[in-house]
């Protein structure tokens, strides 16, 4: 299977891309006309948010998939993507707040994007708490799939309602043109974080899969797993 | 009630046999709803406790947020919906605890009725309970916070209905899950609160508009958001609940 | 008429000054990057601590939930 091989390839890829990306972002790209060097936080904040959204979409896919065809691999990937996704969302939120302080004067200004992200974080914290509080592995898998689906469907609803809620009170920030140099730095960093996040998810997936095995350990004498019984229509 | 009595009560002797004819979804839902409402009416314990809890919550807001009557008046809708939300966590938790005694949920599953009927009846029952609670709270809120119902009772009633139904559909799904997990009293609010934030926003905003007047005609949009929320979560609950309670 | 023109010129000049650069923003940059990398490193450490040891999984136990 080449477990350690994939780990090393991803690690090397991440290291190279992130090293180059950080150089580009911190030294090469020009400072912003208005925000100065503070704007360089974007090169770590935006990729983290993108990764969070990507991973939670993966979690949604796994949740859907599990309800159609149960499998421990799907469940383990769901767990891994939720955990790493939650990490990225939290780091994205914190870096966003740090960016906010010099930009708006406050750490928290109910900006729709950060508010929606905060709600997303609480949602998936609940998801992980549910996984921890259910002992039976099958029920845990089904129930977290249900919660994962409902939570993900909620994200666009939250996004629109919070944006609407805020737009009645707050002037939207003016649109800004982005330098092509900034775009390049952002892209390189984004791919670097993608490789890093893929690595983290892969390892976390193996850990989850191993835990499932231990929980469902079958004596060698029993025949292999049969098909699931027909569900109530 | 034991599991067997449960099955008998809902469908009579014939239907309690395995292999009996499938009963229509609407009939099962109404039968189950009638059972829940009957139990509720006979004891009334749950409704009484919820009413007193919510009244106390409204009172607490007055004390915690200061005697500035203008502030209380401006945010009355928000306080009302927070009180309903906190009460709903108790109500939802209770609605599945009732079934766990004597394994009644297993009895329900034995009936040749859809698991989706269980969802519809539970969610409707919980929603109705919250609406009744809301109706009882409105005069108290009006008195405590000194508000007038500027736009009239019909928009207020509609907001109450949409908001409470919007809370109860996902709440029923999550209550069913949480009632079987560890730390169930913490898990239900943890799962439910982030989910219903859009409904809470919309309901509170709509209520404040009903109470204070709506010069810019925003009420329709907020009620539209609530309606959309209801449509999405009733559908999702309908589809997913059978997976939650299957063995 | 000339005062209007002067006013217009002054307004034009003022609009081009802009918000101005935020001075000394590097502290925030260090803080943000530091927090992000600290978080990632701690998580990676937690994965290392939890890393799987032992033999490869048997096919049966990897397949899926079993009905008895």
Image (cartoon, coloured by chain):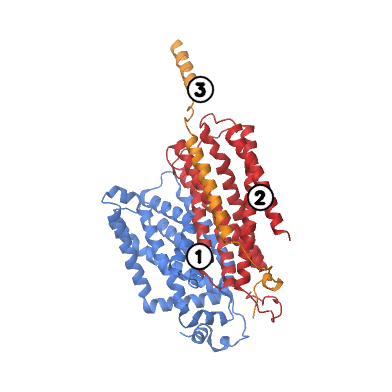
Chain colours: A red, B blue, C orange
Residue topped by disc 3:
C16
Q: Which-is-in-front pick, marks 2 and 1?
A: 2
The residue carrying pointer 3 sits among few (fewer than 14), some (14 to 19) or many (20 or more) residues within 10 Å by Cα, namely: few
Decide which of A20, B75 is in the foreground and name it.
Answer: A20
- The residue furthest left is B67
Q: Quadrant of the N terminus of chain A?
A: bottom right
Q: Locate residue B74, reporting x and y percent.
A: 34, 49
Q: Which mark is residue A123?
A: none
Q: Nearer the viewer, mark 1 or mark 3?
A: 3
Residue identified by numbered label 2: A11
Q: Nearer the viewer, mark 2 or mark 3?
A: 2
Which subunit holds the residue at mark 2?
A: A
Q: CA distance from mark 1 to mark 3?
A: 55 Å
Q: Are marks 1 and 3 in contact (CB under 8 Å)?
A: no
Q: Going 46% across and 13% down the picture, which residue do you hit?
A: C6
Q: Secondary structure at mark 1?
A: helix
Q: Residues within 10 Å of mark 2 (few under 14, many from 20)?
A: some
Q: Chain of mark 3?
A: C
Residue C4 lies, in percent from the top left, at 45, 14
Separation of marks 2 and 3 at Cα, in angstroms: 47 Å
- A58 relative to C34, above or below: below
| Residue at the disc numbered 1 | B169
Residue A120 appears left or right of B152: right
Q: Quadrant of residue B137?
A: bottom left
Q: Residue drawn at (64%, 66%), measured in percent from left and top?
A: A66
Q: Are the residues under marks 2 and 3 on the same chain?
A: no
Instruction: Residue B215: give x, y in percent of width and height.
Output: 41, 44
- Image location of residue B120, percent across then percent down: 53, 70
Decide which of B17, B107 is in the foreground and name it.
B107
Quick one: B93 or A139, which is closer to the camera? A139
- Give SS at disc 3: helix
Q: Residue drawn at (51%, 54%), measured in percent from left and top? A: A121
């Amino acid at each position: 299977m080449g477990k350690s091989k994939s780990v090393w390839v991803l690690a090397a890829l991440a290291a190279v891309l992130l090293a180059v990306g950080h150089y580009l972002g911190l030294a090469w790209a020009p400072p912003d006309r208005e925000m100065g060097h503070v704007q360089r936080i974007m090169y770590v904040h935006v990729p983290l948010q993108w990764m969070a959204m990507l991973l939670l979409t993966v979690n949604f896919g796994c949740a859907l998939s599990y309800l159609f065809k149960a499998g421990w691999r799907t469940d383990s990937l769901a767990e891994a993507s939720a955990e790493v996704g939650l990490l990225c969302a939290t780091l994205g939120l914190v870096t966003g707040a740090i960016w906010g302080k010099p930009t708006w004067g406050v750490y928290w200004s109910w900006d729709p994007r950060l508010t929606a992200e905060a709600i997303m974080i609480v949602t998936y914290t609940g998801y992980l708490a549910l996984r921890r509080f259910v002992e039976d592995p099958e029920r845990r898998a089904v129930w977290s799939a249900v919660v994962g689906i409902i939570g993900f469907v909620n994200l666009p609803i939250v996004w629109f309602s919070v944006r609407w809620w805020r737009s009645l009170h707050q002037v939207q920030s003016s649109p800004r043109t982005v330098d092509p140099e900034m775009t390049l730095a952002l892209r390189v960093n984004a791919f670097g974080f993608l490789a890093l996040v893929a690595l983290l998810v892969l390892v976390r997936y193996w850990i989850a899969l191993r835990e499932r095995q231990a929980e469902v350990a079958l004596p060698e004498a029993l025949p292999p797993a049969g098909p699931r019984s027909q569900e109530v229509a | 009630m034991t599991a067997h009595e449960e099955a008998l009560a809902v469908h009579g002797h014939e239907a309690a046999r395995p292999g009996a004819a499938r009963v229509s979804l609407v009939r099962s839902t109404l039968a189950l709803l009638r059972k829940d409402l009957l139990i509720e009416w006979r004891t009334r314990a749950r409704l009484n406790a919820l009413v007193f809890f919510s009244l106390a919550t409204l009172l607490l807001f007055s004390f915690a947020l200061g005697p500035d009557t203008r502030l209380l008046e401006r945010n009355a809708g928000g306080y009302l919906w927070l009180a309903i939300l906190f009460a709903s966590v108790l109500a939802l938790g209770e609605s599945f605890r009732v079934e766990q005694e004597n394994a009644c949920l297993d009895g329900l599953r034995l009936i040749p009725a859809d698991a989706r009927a269980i969802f519809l009846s539970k969610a409707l029952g919980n929603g109705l309970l919250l609406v009744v609670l809301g109706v009882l709270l409105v005069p108290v809120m009006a008195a405590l916070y000194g508000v007038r119902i500027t736009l009239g009772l019909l928009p207020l009633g509609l907001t109450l209905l949409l908001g409470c139904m919007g809370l109860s559909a996902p709440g029923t799904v999550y209550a069913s899950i949480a009632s079987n997990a560890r730390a169930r009293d913490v898990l239900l609010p943890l799962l439910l609160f982030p989910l219903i934030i859009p409904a809470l926003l919309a309901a509170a905003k709509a209520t404040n508009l009903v109470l204070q007047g709506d010069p810019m005609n925003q009420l329709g949009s907020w009620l539209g958001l609530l309606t959309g929320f209801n449509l999405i979560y009733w559908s999702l609950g309908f589809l997913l609940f059978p997976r939650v309670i299957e063995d | 008429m000339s005062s209007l023109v002067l006013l217009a010129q002054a307004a034009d000049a003022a609009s081009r000054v802009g918000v101005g650069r935020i001075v000394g923003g590097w502290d925030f940059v260090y803080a943000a990057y530091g927090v992000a990398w600290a978080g990632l490193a701690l998580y990676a450490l937690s994965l290392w601590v939890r890393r799987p040891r032992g033999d490869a999984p048997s096919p049966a136990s990897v397949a899926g939930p079993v009905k008895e």
